[in-house]
Image (tube, helix red, strand yellow):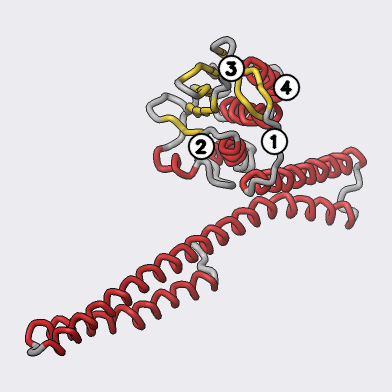
Amino acid sequence: MRFRSPTNIQLRRAQLVLILAAVVPTILMTATGIILLVVGQGSIAIVAGILVLAFCTSSLTGYLLGSIFVSRGASLARVQNDFLSSVSHEFRTPITSIRMFIETLRDGRVTDPAEQQRCLRIVGQEMERLDGLVTKLLDLSRIEAGKQPFERVPVPVADLVKDAITALDAVRMGDELKLEVEVHPDLEVMGDRLALGQVFVNLLVNAWKYTPKENKCITFRVYPHKKYVVFDVEDNGDGVPPGERKYIFETFERGSGAINAGTTGSGLGLPIVRAITKAHGGDVHLMGGTAGACFRVRLPRRTS
């Protein structure tokens, strides 16, 4: 059951007040205006009926506008509530782990030096995880607010592909993987090489993490299409269930397959991909009809 915040409750009450204060009287006055027009005699009754109906129309318009603003406020409050709940959940896990190991060491329950070092190593890993979450959140916030400065220079697509593959090789550390790369020559985009590189690193790492341990296969295709350069990152995993597709780019959202498999992740990779791509005038979509998952990024093509 989803918790309803006090702000949401107040907005719902405001909607009820609008209905009682505007809609009900408007309906009664509309009936009065119609009666005056139908059965009234003389010009005064007709004019009065017209004025009443005009007033009712204005009241109804005001109600509709007010209802729209209240609904938008309720939606914003709901998004904020969901975001805070997600942030709290993501931060609570490493904080709980850090507190538990610190209390264990403080109380002297671990006396073996090797075990003490293991506890300290886990605390360090959890602190790095917290730092990574904070960094990603700040980056995402700055990008979405348009406050993250990006270079606007010509970037060869071949360099982006090379950077992403190099980063993937460092992450997978020799893990067996069949990587098929198809890159159309002489393509360039305008943008920030480091930021755009992060887009494709995130997509390739996701494809590597969410495919089976055996017979991993990732296809990285890059080709021109009209005024865009299209990047397809496709894997041979289980894909994303249809019911989860529309949420996959939301902050802290993770697929049920990743959660059930215990795959590590923060749910910030794809939102950052979308934010960087949008900031560069492009878009990203999860394509349907594929055996695994296929993410398609489109960036404006640089033409001489």
> In 3D space, how far apart are the residues under numbered discs 4 and 1 (Cα atoms)?
25 Å
Kindly identify which numbered label has been placed on residue 304.
Answer: 3
Residue tagged 4 = 170
User: Who comes first in sequence, dot 1 or dot 3?
Assistant: 1
* Marks 4, 2: nearer the viewer: 4
192 relative to 134, above or below: above
Give the residue displayed 39% in from the left and 68% down from the top: 65
Callout 3: SS: loop
Of label 3 and label 2, which has the lower sequence position? 2
Q: Distance between the residues labelled 4 and 2?
A: 24 Å
Q: Mark 2 points at which residue?
A: 257
Mark 2, Cα crowd under 10 Å, few <14 / some 14-19 / many 20+, is: some
Characterize the local packing of mark 4: few (<14), some (14-19) or many (20 or more) Cα atoms within 10 angstroms.
Answer: few
Which residue shows up at 46% across the image and 35% down it?
A: 240
Q: Tag 2: residue type?
A: Gly
Question: In terms of depth relative to the viewer, which is nearer, 159 or 37?
Answer: 37
Residue drawn at point x = 41 percent, y = 74 percent: 15
Q: Which amino acid does label 1 sit on?
A: Phe
Q: Camera-side residue: 68 or 81?
A: 68
SS at mark 2? helix
Q: Nearer the viewer, mark 4 or mark 1?
A: 1
Cα gap from disc 4 to disc 3, whole angstroms: 35 Å
Hey, what amino acid is under mark 3?
A: Ser
Residue identifier under label 1? 150
Q: Is residue 263 above or below residue 144?
A: above
Q: Distance between the residues labelled 2 and 1?
A: 34 Å
Quadrant occupied by the C terminus: top right
The mark that comes first in sequence, 4 or 2, is 4
